[in-house]
Image: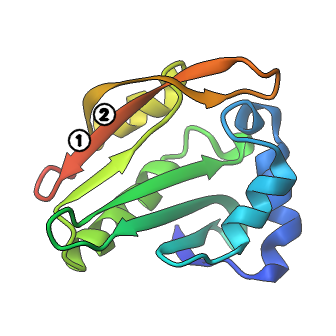
Amino acid sequence: MNLRPLTEADRPRVHEILSAPDVAKWWGEPGEETDGLLAKEGDQQAYAIEHNGQTVGVIQSWEELDHRYRHAGIDLAVHPDHYGLGLGAQAIRTLAQRLFDQGHHRITIDPAAANVRAIHVYEKLGFRRVGILRDYEQGADGSWHDGLLLDLLKGELK
């Protein structure tokens, strides 16, 4: 497994990953989400997750740089064809360690509260539940869904 910065050349594959039904139900509209990942805005950085020479997912981080609140957040999507291989967990471990090495003391992740599969992986890596973010995200059907805030402190990564 390898992480490398996303480039414009990744657009078709990123869109394909985010359009997969098992991914799209947790992310927003694939075109908008792809644009957001490729925008490279300020404190955000997105990476391709590569396995055996193929892009199988994406992971992004954002940073809060104020020294009093310094921490980072992570978002992840892996194509369902590559579920169960531990690639998402490896990508999170790699990126989390980089962020800790850069001076962050805490990393957050905020999956949909109903995304049991993702939450299981995050907790295996050492993330702990902080609380429910009520009506956190609006779905494609216009209804609101809860999110789950999890965090990981330096030294807790498994």
Circle 1 crowding by C-alpha within 10 Å: few under 14, some 14–19, many from 20: some
Q: Identify the element where label 2 is drawn.
A: helix
Residue bearing mark 1 = 126
**Residue 108 pos. (x, y %):** 33, 48
* Location of residue 76 with respect to 111 vertically, above or below: below
Tell me, yes or no, if residue 87 can be seen here: no
The amino acid type of the residue labelled 1 equals: Gly
Q: CA distance from mark 1 to mark 2?
A: 5 Å
Q: Is residue 39 visible?
A: yes
In the drawing, what numbered circle is on residue 102? none
Q: Are marks 1 and 2 in contact (CB under 8 Å)?
A: yes
> Element under label 1?
loop
Viewer-proximal residue among 55 and 43 = 43
Q: How far across and how far down the image is residue 125, in percent?
A: 29, 43
Name which quarter of the figure residue 70 lies in: bottom left
Q: Give the quarter of the image for residue 148.
A: top left
Label 2 neighbour load within 10 Å: few <14, some 14-19, many 20+: some
Residue at image point 23% right, 47% down: 152
Q: What number of labels is visible?
A: 2
Instruction: Residue at 74% x, 54% y: name it.
Output: 33
Question: In terms of depth relative to the viewer, which is nearer, 137 or 61?
Answer: 137
Residue kind at label 2, given as amino acid type:
Glu
Q: Is residue 129 above or below residue 14?
A: above
Residue 14, image quadrant: bottom right
Horizontal and vertical percent position of residue 26: 66, 34
The colour mode here is rainbow
The residue under label 2 is: 123
- Above or below for 65 versus 89: below
